[in-house]
Amino acid sequence: MRVYELAKKLGMENKDLIPELKKMGVPVASHSSALDDDTVQKALDKLSQKAKGAKASGKASGDDVVGKTRDTEVKHESGHGAKASKAAIVEEPAKADKRRILIKRKKDDEPVEASALVAPPPSEAEPSAVAAPPVAHPVVSEPPPPPPVVLPELPEIGTILAQPPPAPVEKVVVKPAAVLPGAAPGAVLTPEALAAKKKSQALEAIEAEGLKEKLKKAKKTGRPKEEPDVKHREDAARWQDLRAIPTVPRRDDRSRHLHHSAPSEITKPRRKSVKVTLGTTVKEFAELIGQRPADIVRKLMEMGQMLTFNQPMNMDVASMIAEEAGVKVEISVEKAGDELLEAVVQAGEGDERLEPRPPVVTIMGHVDHGKTSLLDAIRQTKVAEGEAGGITQHIGAYTVSVHGKQVTFLDTPGHEAFTAMRSRGAKVTDIVILVVAADDGVMPQTIEAINHAKAAGVPLIVAMNKIDKPEANPDRVRNALSEYGLISEAWGGDTIMVEVSAKQKTGLDTLLEMILLQSEVLELKADPHRQAKGTVVEAKLERGRGPVATVLVQNGTLKVGDVFVVGTFSGRVRALLNDRGVKTQQATPSIPVEVIGLPGVPSAGDVFQVVSDERVAREIADERAQKQRSADLAGQTKVSLDDLFARIKEGSAKELAIVIKADVQGSSEALAAAVEKLPTPAVRIRVIHNGVGGITESDVLLAAASRAIIIGFNVRPEPKAANLAEQQGVDVRLYTIIYEALSDIKAAMEGLLDPTLKERSLGRAEVRQVFTIPKAGVVAGSYVVDGTISRAAVGVRLIRDNVVVFEGRLGSLRRFKDDVREVQQGYECGISIENFNDIKAGDVIEAYTIDKIAGKL
Ligand SMILES: Nc1nc2c(ncn2[C@@H]2O[C@H](COP(=O)(O)OP(=O)(O)OP(=O)(O)O)[C@@H](O)[C@H]2O)c(=O)[nH]1
């Protein structure tokens, strides 16, 4: 047993007990010195006698139910003259409350001891506590305390002060639900009682605050300095326990207080142990351990740390300060990685001072419609204009100046790059320029681009390119675009359409002016005064320079020397180069810069965030790396028909986004229309894209970015797309009957989707040559490109240009002249399909099986 435990048992203060023990010849150094059983027994015999002798009165009612331990405690109460007088001003009901608090705390602290004690029947409840009118005293206005049951130790103020560990004051409030049967009628919280309770709480805080200050002063003068550890613990305990002591004796005083004093700054109660998360700010930390933020700042200063209220605490320092205050700190990893980043960033943010920023533009359009030519034309005319040496450096984005205003172009044309970025959560583009060749018109990728831009909610400006060509027909383009909801301003719509020629460099100024006009409408703003946040638009490993990343600053100002986190890396900016390869000291919002000083190559779309603390940056990056390793990242965005119902129920799914791909236009449109018409009260169905042909990587990216599922009708995913879907957790559903697709969606919404049967592809073979063999029919000389082609396959399908041409059973499978059971990837074989001869070189034969999956309970 330790000295402080014995002191507790005896109801004495450590400082009183230690000399007593020394007198008995027991060598004790501090309150935490260990005592053997003999000594404990001796001390108990001697000192409890002494305590008994010294104390005869002042015991609280309800003693009859209290055991020996409490006896000693109670008797000890009045053993301290000064403290006894203090106790005298405490009204009886208040005592009851305090006792209740202490009981509960005891329970929390020492569950074993507490549980060993027997609760008396409710009728034995302490009369004073029961009889107390609910509004007579603030504390009594709370639900009535349980009878004075578990009272192993009931120290009076003096004893309380010596309690080493602080008590969780708020925790001890007994909720109405906990009221024991037979408790006082005042237990029911009437509105008045409730008001009184509130008052009492505020008052308690005020009183505790006042007392705390007094105690602090007293402590400064009266305390010997040689026991810092004990002192801190006792102080903490004192502060805390005083909060629990109702010291307002008279109603009048109380109301005066309430009218004139504001509640204390301390909003949260002290607890024995607190959970501190990485990134917890000074203010939050102060609240957690129940101290004033200013006091924490002062302590930090003493420790050589200059922090403001909103800056994150260093965890080691936090532990030290908390320990001083007698609070144990548990460093929680709850806020880690991105949550921590968010907390740190938020903590560092002051008032927003928004200023206009340049627009960021991405160019999209069908193949060969002139995206690259347009980007080059703008760069050449605008960037090269004022530059003697022309463009010296090519980075993933560039900025041009138009009438003194800047426009930033991302140098990765095409909607795939755009959506790939978006699927990583990066929203970089403000305006999309849709390039449509005026001679060619609206093409499949034009439509894809429109849908990708729409899904991202980014406004479009149409650049009708190749206007110089004699066969150019802009009206035809306008007409075609109007079918997709893009109606030209000239025709009364709201889509800006500009005729340009990238080749002859005409119309470029108008296009740029329109971009500026659109950006004005969008009121693009950012705050250049804060720590920078941007997105990586391109990253590579360069010989001699190491990893370099083109970062588009989106908010704040990025400066040389800044500490950052990007993807799974953290570091410090060693140098910044602008889009012309010139060294620069800083980059403001919407300005792309090349960053040097990265420890590795991040991915395009990664967020680049500046943080103030290098250690926090490292922690965040490490956490992310770990997360990535455990592949959590992929699972996060997953949306599937299987768990749709569960999501609807938990309220996280309000909308089901669908990408439809079909073998023919008619089917894709029919399916889209039918799906959108499904009666679905719980969620809204939105077809974000429907098109013709196999499922491509672009489709999967779009689905991943929009948390959509993909429905393929008579089509298959390209192998790369299938892998990507697997990686990204995109649910790809393949059907050959429209009705089945519809009924699956319906069933999924009602939670009735049968998840027991699932198709699994076994392998794919590419048809290299086709032979017609008498009797055997058509045999496809094939090469297995992935997986295995096996006789065990339930079925095979013939795919031509990612469209399912035929579905049936495997006829024969041979290597050379022998029938074989299976052929693995990388081998050639001869395959025939039952009842099907229309096989052509270039076709793909896919073998699949159906897995039975155990139904979820
Ligand atoms: N006559 C004429 N030809 C143009 C114009 N713009 C581009 N072209 C031509 O169109 C072809 C395709 O241009 P690109 O800029 O490569 O088109 P893209 O959209 O970037 O093509 P991908 O990168 O393959 O998607 C090139 O041969 C260009 O010379 C134009 O305004 N007028």
Image: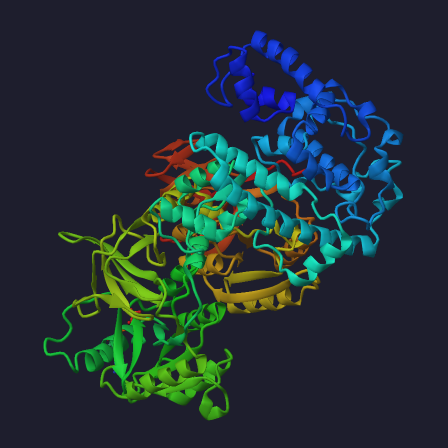
Question: Which one is in front, 535 or 835?
Answer: 535
In the image, farthest residue toward the top:
38
Q: Position of residue 652 (x, y in %)?
A: 61, 55
**Position of 258 compared to 507: left or right?**
right
Q: Quadrant of residue 99?
A: top right
> Does residue 230 sit above or below 263 in this rendering?
above
User: Residue at position x 25%, y 66% from top?
Assistant: 586
**Position of 168 compared to 407: left or right?**
right
Q: Position of residue 290 (x, y in %)?
A: 55, 46
Q: Quadrant of residue 763?
A: top left
Quadrant (top left, top right, bottom left, bottom right) of the C terminus: top right
User: Residue at position x 56%, y 30% from top?
Assistant: 164
Number of marks drawn: 0
Residue 339 seen by the camera: no
Q: Position of residue 278 (x, y in %)?
A: 44, 45
Question: Which one is in front, 174 or 363?
Answer: 174
Q: Position of residue 686 (x, y in %)?
A: 58, 66
Q: Quadrant of ligand 1?
A: bottom left
> Does residue 734 sit above or below 456 in this rendering?
above
In the image, farthest residue toward the left:
389
